[in-house]
Image: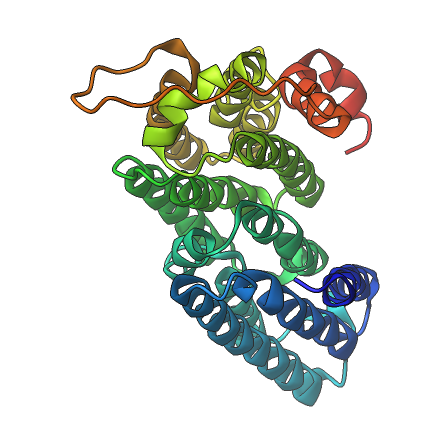
Amino acid sequence: MNPHAKLITSLSLLLGTTITISSNHWMMAWTGLEINTLAIIPMISKSHHPRAIEAAIKNFLVQAAASTLVLFSSTINAWHTGQWDLTQLTHPTSCLLLTTAIAMKLGLVPFHFWFPEVLQGSSLTTALLLSTMMKFPPITILFMTSHSLNPTLLTAMAIASAALGGWMGLNQTQIRKILAFSSISHLGWMSIIIIYNPKLTLLTFYLYSLMTITVFLTLNTTKTVKLSTMMTSWTKTPMLNATLMLTLLSLAGLPPLTGFLPKWLIIQELTKQEMTTAATIITMLSLLGLFFYLRLAYYSTITLPPNSTNHMKQWHINKPTSAPIAIVTSLSALLLPLSPMILTTI
């Protein structure tokens, strides 16, 4: 991609996100979402591969439909209440439409179909942006309107997302698709708690983003996109692959790693709200996710599975691991002991 085009799209992405997360007026929030959508399209389609073009079109159509619903929802609310403030969403139809729109933007079940396909058609760097930065503005809108959302609808969507994210990830061989279903599953955990403790949702999102950034940057270093190439990538960067295993187990939510903290706090909060059944169901469903994270971890480090084809060993990379990867890897594995300090912020 042309450096000037890359600079413009990157700045537009930052601008769109900043406008949405700092706005109080519905029109400004919508404008930020639109800028974001338009900025990511050149990034997805930059390879000019038919699959990349298809991914860009799918992403555009879904995001445009969701933005239209956001505008429709805010207009109905303004019509009935005279309020354009983000926190004053009180009309029931508007709340329902907004929940649907944000679910489409985030890729929550049953509006998840576009997300794995778009991630599969993008490069690893763009997939990273789609999984983290593009999710931030919709999460912020949910955070601002959390007091007026429908708890039953959100809980149903959250449990369905956790179930489908775990179930669909089991049979995948493409790592980007596995990470897409992992994202859907994590969004289920975030949306189940948004009404009861919005700050906990933000904390979960930050920690999820941290771990996802680590996984994508590591995969980008070793240029790994399939499970079959992951099997042989340990010869390239043995140390990086060992830390990738820790990050994947952290994403699965195993103690004593960072990923255990948000799951632990969410289960605790759900129990406080007398939602023990929902907490039990979503915890059981996280075992599905644990299975495919363990599978990824097994492929990345523990052993080379027996296979009939002779894989060529890849060349060992002699250059040292970059500082950002080292920092995010350390944070995504070792933050649990700092949980009392983290809890003072929420």
Inspect this view and state whether residue 290 appears: no
Q: Quadrant of residue 282?
A: top left
Q: For the point 76% across and 66% down, which residue is it?
A: 12
Q: Horizontal and vertical percent for residue 129? A: 62, 51
Quadrant for the C terminus in the image = top right
Name the foreground residue: 280 vs 19. 19
Name the foreground residue: 147 vs 174. 174
Inspect this view and state whether residue 67 appears: yes
Q: Is residue 333 above or below residue 322?
A: above
Asked whether, in this view, residue 4 is left or right of residue 141, the answer is right
Q: For the point 39% across and 10% down, which residue is it?
A: 302
Q: Is residue 197 above or below residue 78?
A: above
Count of labels in the image: 0
Q: Horizontal and vertical percent for residue 198? A: 67, 45
Q: Quadrant of residue 300?
A: top left
Q: Is residue 290 above or below residue 148?
A: above
Q: For the point 50% across and 40% down, which residue is it?
A: 186
Q: For the point 54% across and 71% down, which residue is it?
A: 63
Q: Is residue 102 above or below residue 136?
A: below
Q: How are the colours assigned in the image?
A: rainbow
Quadrant for the N terminus in the image = bottom right
Q: Please identify the residue farthest to the left as the structure is shown.
A: 308
Asked whether, in this view, residue 138 is left or right of residue 63, the answer is right
Q: Horizontal and vertical percent for residue 263? A: 54, 27
Q: Horizontal and vertical percent for residue 178? A: 39, 39
Q: Please identify the residue farthest to the bottom as the structure is shown.
A: 79
Q: Quadrant of residue 338?
A: top right
